[in-house]
Amino acid sequence: MEKIKIQKTIFDKRKDKPFTWEDIKNIPFEDDDVIQLEWVDEDPSPFSGYWHGEVNRMVEETDEELQERIRKGEEVERFVKERRYESYLRLKKEFETE
């Protein structure tokens, strides 16, 4: 299995005031980075909410992440196979009695 590109958050910050250049100028940006600066208002109260800044980058997964992805895939495959077998047994029992 080959390594894939995965999204990594390289910057994540909450503030009470809007972001300025000073807040992000030291981030080593790359051309394809996705920058999100937004106001988050979780409560209708006029005194709640915050500014959220995030920078995401697509990077190649590490060897550990690859192994974890393979392990999870095998686990899901086993789970699906078990559910299919259980369905098969239920259907077999249902149609054998007819």
Image: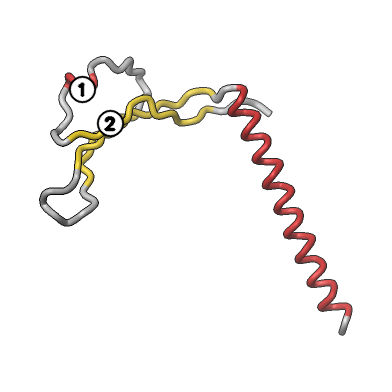
Residue most extreme to the left: 46
Task: Give the vertical position of 58 relative to 30 (above or below).
Answer: below
Q: Is residue 72 left or right of residue 44?
A: right
Q: Is residue 65 left or right of residue 45?
A: right
Q: Is residue 45 left or right of residue 98?
A: left
Alpha carbon separation for disc pair 2 and 1: 9 Å
Which residue appears at 21% of the width and 54% of the height? 43
Residue ID for mark 2:
13
Residue ID for mark 1:
23
Q: Quadrant of residue 14?
A: top left
Q: Would you say the residues marked 2 and 1 are in contact, meaning their CB atoms lie under 8 Å apart?
A: yes
Q: How many marks?
A: 2
Q: In what element is the residue under mark 1?
A: helix
Q: Quadrant of residue 51?
A: top left
**Which of the two labelled residues, at mark 2 and mark 1, occupies the earlier sequence position?**
2
Locate residue 82, reporting x and y percent. Answer: 76, 56
Task: Give the vertical position of 22 relative to 37 (above or below).
Answer: above
Which residue appears at 32% of the width and 30% of the height? 12
Locate residue 38, reporting x and y percent. Answer: 22, 39
The amino acid on which the numbered mark 2 sits, given as a three-letter code, is Lys
Locate residue 69, reporting x and y percent. Answer: 62, 35
Residue 64's mark?
Answer: none
Q: In what element is the residue under mark 2?
A: strand
Q: Is residue 81 left or right of residue 49?
A: right
Locate residue 84, reporting x and y percent. Answer: 75, 60
Which residue appears at 65% of the width and 40% of the height? 72
Tell me if mark 2 has few (under 14), some (14-19) or many (20+) residues whose alpha carbon lies within 10 angstroms of its own.
few
82 or 35, nearer to the observer: 82
